[in-house]
Image (cartoon, rainbow, N blue to C red):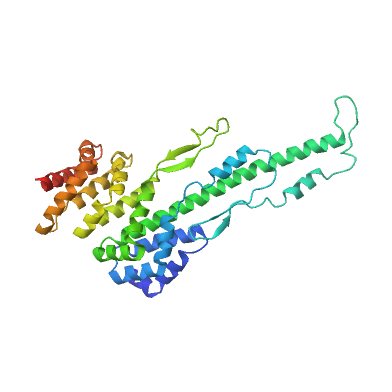
Amino acid sequence: MNKAILEAGILKTLCDHARAVDPNLRLSSIWALKHLILSAPKHLKLECLGGLGPGWLKHIISQDVGDSFSASGARSERNPGLGTPLAMGTPNAAGEQVDLLNAIDGSAEGYRLANDGDEEESKMVDGPGALSRRELESEQQNQQQSQWRAPSRRNVIGAANQLRADDVAVQKEGLDFIRNLICGSAALEMIDCLFEELGQNRMFEILISKLRPRLVNAFNRERRSVENSVRQTPPQTDIVTSVCYIVVHLAAGRPRHRQLLVSQSELLKLILPLFAHPDPQIRSCCAWIVINLTWVDDQSDHSNCRERAKELVRLGWYEKLQVLESDPVLDVRERTKTALHQINCALR
């Protein structure tokens, strides 16, 4: 089946669609490409990577898809009386500027129509407790403005959340594309290719940024003190899973790849809390990373493997593995058993 669709020229089409403006088309295309390269030969993986463009791939996996509207939301709360729509734009995963708040077409028109009517119906009798025509029109205007101003703010938040969800989904598929790129056929060569095309240091910087907790502005209406203006949020579980599998595959590379990975202290420290992650797949990945890092290809790698094991112990990974020995999930316990065995053998 893969051969038939490749001969039909689907690869170029998918690479073009991956940069489409439509988020669904973009997401579906990257999803298809990540499956297309799974267990694919080296030349096909290289062709796919070239079709997407290393720079574009690096862009979609490295962009910050956090809540960029916290500041604008805070401005709205601080200025609840603003009656003019806000003009907002932000780049999406494809790099285009997207207008998140479309002006409510016809708002003023609708207001005029709501107030247009028979002249006789708008006349009020002046008397005790009655509103003058000017006062009534002023009150109606305030009501009309409040009616359309509140929904417009909800539209902004909804559009922002949708844009963020689209970008997170595209970013996850981009990371999974890399995960499949360095897995299976020609995995060792593709790791070197990945470092060459995206940059070795830059690649590790991206992985670190995906696991680092984010600082988010968290203004509330009642209290806006410095203490409650910023809060930490954990990274997205889907993103963490994709990053962990990339690390698993990097650790399954050549001995020099394992040496390079174990030298990334910041990355290893960020993985450490994931041993207690509520998702068992992530906990299993943590043990899997240890298994691959403590693997010995041949006798020449034995001394380096011992140093890698010592570094994991120094960073606290051994203690975390001991906790996973009683994990409620069987797969996690079994991988943990293998990981502990290999560390103990490496340290002998």
Quarter of the picture holding the N terminus: bottom left
Height in image: 94 above or below 82?
below
* Residue closer to the observer: 105 or 224: 224
* Residue closer to the observer: 261 or 335: 261
- The residue positioned 41% from the left and 64% from the top of the image is 55
Q: Is residue 192 left or right of residue 50?
A: left
Residue 39 visible in the displayed image: no
Residue 196 visible in the displayed image: yes
Q: Is residue 314 left or right of residue 110?
A: left
- The number of numbered badges drawn on the structure is 0
* Residue closer to the observer: 198 or 249: 198
Q: Is residue 287 left or right of residue 131?
A: left
Where on the picture, by quarter, is residue 10?
bottom left
Height in image: 176 above or below 141?
below
Residue 314: x and y, percent?
A: 21, 42
Residue extending farthest to the front is: 226
Residue 326: x and y, percent?
A: 21, 35
Residue 254: x and y, percent?
A: 20, 60
Residue 28: x and y, percent?
A: 44, 60
Quarter of the picture holding the C terminus: top left
- The residue positioned 50% from the left and 64% from the top of the image is 20
